[in-house]
Amino acid sequence: MAPLSLPPGPRYVIKQLPNLIIPPLAVYLLSRISREHFGVAIPAWLVVVAYALSWPVALIALVHWNDFANARRARALGAVIPREVDHKYPGSVDLLKAMFVLDKTNYLGETLFRWTERYGPVFNFRVMFEDRIFTSEPEYIKMMLATEFNHYEKGPLLNSQLETLLGVGVFNSDGHMWKFHRSMTRPFFSKDRISHFDLFDRHAEHALNKAAERLREGVPVDWQDVVSRFTMDSATEFLFGKDVQSLSAPIPYPSTHPAAVQQQTAAVQPADRFVRAFQDALEATAIRGRFLQSWPLVEMFGDKVKKYLNAVDEFIDPIVEEAVRKNHKKEVELEGVTSDVEKASRDQVRDDETLLEHLCKFTDDHKVIKDETLNILFAGRDTTSCTLTFAVYALTQHPDVLARLRKEVLDVVGPTARPTYDNVREMKYMRAFINEVLRLYPPVPVNSRCSIEAMRWKNMTPDQPDHYVPPRTRCLYSVLVMQRRKDLWGPDALMFDPDRFLDDRVQKYLVPNPFIFLPFNAGPRICLGQQFAYNETSFMLVRLLQRFSGFRLRQDAHPASVPPPGVEHSPYAVDGHEKVWMRSHLTAYAKNGLWVEMDEVAQE
């Protein structure tokens, strides 16, 4: 059997064999040299002890050597490695254990908020003897993402954790492969493509009809589930020309409703298979991150992500194969084309062209095409779903914002008309509202890069030594923490207030330092679908506010969605009292749903 066909665990062990063999081999050679060349016979019991201790001794020696080398290189640059988070036990195992325990009851990222308050915006969360530099400082994030972009990459650890799901797509590749994917995809997200609202309108109407039907039963609806289906159907049609029709399956009842038990025991609807499989694969991928570089050891007997992808493959593989076949046929027919004008025309993105068809012009590699479309699907579906979920949560908590936003929708678009691209551009408060949702509930709360070489970060505190980042070091950054920092956004940073994007606070905070607001990343890897996301979110919110006038949170209908006290009353909660349970796998979501009641407007 070829090594690549093995599960992650055995592959990892095979890769580590030199590290496992060399220490005991050294003991064996030393004992033999001692006996044969010096005539000293080492007692058998001592040799056995030496074998047993060879691994920890080798690890300790390696750790100390790396620490010594890094400290020496840092001194040579007049810098220091950022301060380590205090811990009691080797490898920071006490911190890891505490984080896993607190994660079940505390606010998302609360440990990072607290450490930032204690150690400042940059510190070393050293885990299992490896440096992990964390920062919420915009200048350092700016360096990683933009000004010193070429000195950082996603890195082999993240690549390996995401490989099963995202393959070598644009979000999980570096270097030439990333540039190749980026160049393929960029033309597809032109203004003309992202401003076509026909697709949004069809799926938005379907989603709102489903919600309205359930609400007419007098039952709260899980808005997160509804918009997850809306964005999934919209994204799959946009990418493949064929949607998974997740909205055709029944939406869930809250656990307090009698129909919930029957629904839970019913067979999975065909339309739900793809959605559930994709979601399960995301969660299994996120779990890998908890086990750091040793994650393959928990997958010794099989790839725990791959087992969920059968339903995904059943949908995507035939579509990819058909698209490749059609493109090949077209290429054969055009073999005689010699006109440069005709060739250029052929390579342009047509109005009716899907991303899949566009990618086939660049490559006929099934895996490359499939990986790229899955990457865009993941980014386009989950991030917009997150934004729409927390947007409606904000509307349930701020009736004044709801009234003002709905007035703008009715004034600009009207009570029933379909919004246009120009309408979306005209609605300034809508844009400010979405920005405030993205600020306080960023879809990707924590991200990372890996330093390719040794880096020096200028200390933002005067008269303090600069920070030294060793080569091949994981650098974590959190826009969730950064976008709630009071020193960057003002004393009201934890208050939900869209006006901060319209009044003089823009000039005071955001204009002088635009890198304090990064919901779509920045630099060369900035999200290609940023405007697509704004348009899709705006469109759905317009349609929602045309159809419904009042919003009330009903988490009590589904008790599992009620956050524990440590979340609800966290000092880092929005408005000081948060009634939704924000969590994150690869992207943020409301744990166990966002259950709401909405007042439907009478249609004339």
Image: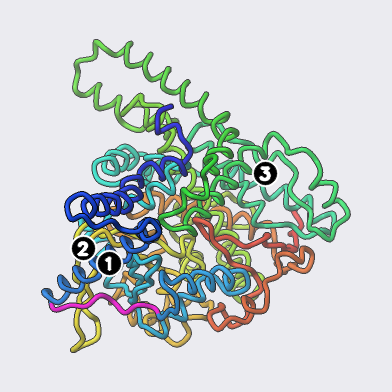
Amino acid of disc 1? Lys
578 and 598: which is toward the camera: 578
Q: Callout 3, which amino acid?
A: His
Q: Name the element at disc 2.
A: helix
Which segment is the magenta one?
78-85
Q: Residue at x 64, y 77 (%)?
A: 568
Q: Quick one: label 3, few (<14), some, or many (20+) residues within 10 Å?
A: some
Query: Could you tell which of marks 1 and 3 lies nearer the N-terminus?
Result: 1
Q: Kindly report which numbered mark, 2 or 3, lies closer to the viewer in this rendering.
A: 2
Q: CA distance from mark 1 to mark 3?
A: 41 Å
| Depicted 124 relative to depicted 360: above or below | below
Q: Residue at x 27, y 38 (%)?
A: 180
Foreground pick, 494 / 87: 87
Q: Residues within 10 Å of mark 2 (few under 14, many from 20)?
A: some
The quadrant of the picture occupied by the N terminus is top left
What residue would you read off at disc 3?
A: 206
Where residue 577 sits: x, y (%)? Answer: 63, 80
Question: In front of the other: label 1 or label 3?
Answer: 1
Colour scheme = rainbow
User: Mark number for residue 142?
Assistant: 1
The residue beneath circle 2 is 147
Which comes sooner in the sequence, label 2 or label 3? 2
Main secondary structure along the magenta-highlighted residues: loop
What secondary structure is found at the residue carrying circle 1? helix
**Quick check: marks 2 and 1 in contact, CB under 8 Å?**
yes
Q: Is residue 307 visible?
A: yes
- Left or right: 524 as drawn, with respect to 531: left
